[in-house]
Image (spheres, helix red, strand yellow):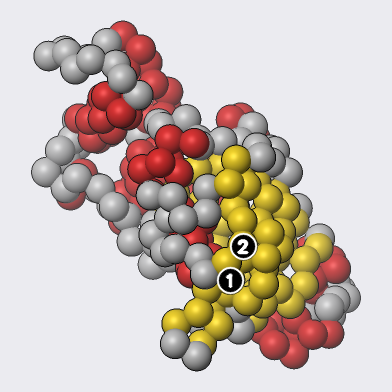
Amino acid sequence: MLSIRHLAKSFGGLKATDDVSLEFADGSLTAVIGPNGAGKSTFFNLITGALTPDGGQILLDGVDLAGRSPPDIMRHGIGRAFQVASIFPSLTVEETMLAAVCADQRRNGILHRRFPLPETRDRAEHAMEMLGLANKRQRVAATLAHGDQKLLDIALALVLDPKVLLLDEPTAGMGPEERWRMIDKVRELWEKEKITVVFIEHDMDIVFKIAPSIVVLCYGRILATGTPDAIRNNDAVIDAYLGTEHGGAPT
């Protein structure tokens, strides 16, 4: 279980994360939403070690990861894919995946070999199959379509075998059809891999369709948590973020 307790981060006088406490059960799927400047990316940055919290705990299976380095946090089982895909543009899809697994194995004390171990290839193959990239293994990453580059970024996080996967706006920059293809892959990944997935998303149609649980942040604080129906009918959330388009009882 990922447990966030009284997490806090300020920049000068601005409280970007203000006493946030949340729990994400093993195998859960949760959307994090809120207006621009709500603290969503800061929240992810604190969990993954890109930022150091001013206070609070980030507990994964009882181990406090708050303030640790990003590689250490990743080794403990928290992976992340970014809003802007972080890939190796000159490598093929397959080379990218093998490089990520080899680097992870060296971090875990497995000696470097000239040729990848069978286990290395198996892990890379599984991630490519899971994200629908196996038939594009020989494509250079820079030549992939935008959506496929984002899938490759998710595959890079998945290949490290995380317990928790954080997805920062997985559908950003995509057209409607491509957006739904992406989110279908995210849901398939969650269902098959049985890992905890937390994603930031601005498209409320997507959020309300696939997320069993939703967290709403506003000005660094938790405004509401609950099911899609509970969030859609929460007056405070309607006023602060949803407006009348998505708020109110379903028709």
- Local SS, label 1: strand
Query: Whole-percent x and y of residue 99?
Result: 22, 30
Give residue 214's quadrant in the image: bottom right
Query: Whole-percent x and y of residue 34?
Result: 62, 76
Query: Whole-percent x and y of residue 131?
Result: 44, 36
Residue 8's label in the rendered image is 1
Residue pictured at 74% horizontal, 77% vertical: 223
Residue pictured at 23% horizontal, 15% vertical: 111
Say if mark 2 contacts mark 1, CB within 8 Å.
Answer: yes
- Is residue 111 shown above or below 126? above
- Local SS, label 2: strand
Q: Earlier in the sequence, mark 2 or mark 1?
A: 1
User: Which image quarter holds the N terminus?
Assistant: top right
- Is residue 151 shown above or below 106? below
| Res. 63 visible in picture | yes
Residue 56's label in the rendered image is 2
Amino acid type assigned to the residue bearing label 1 in the image: Ala
Give residue 205's quadrant in the image: bottom right
User: Which image quarter holds the C terminus?
Assistant: bottom right
Instruction: Characterize the local packing of mark 2: few (<14), some (14-19) or many (20 or more) Cα atoms within 10 angstroms.
Output: some
Amino acid type assigned to the residue bearing label 2 in the image: Gly
Residue 240's label in the rendered image is none
Residue pictured at 66% horizontal, 40% vertical: 62
Inter-mark Cα distance, 2 to 1: 6 Å
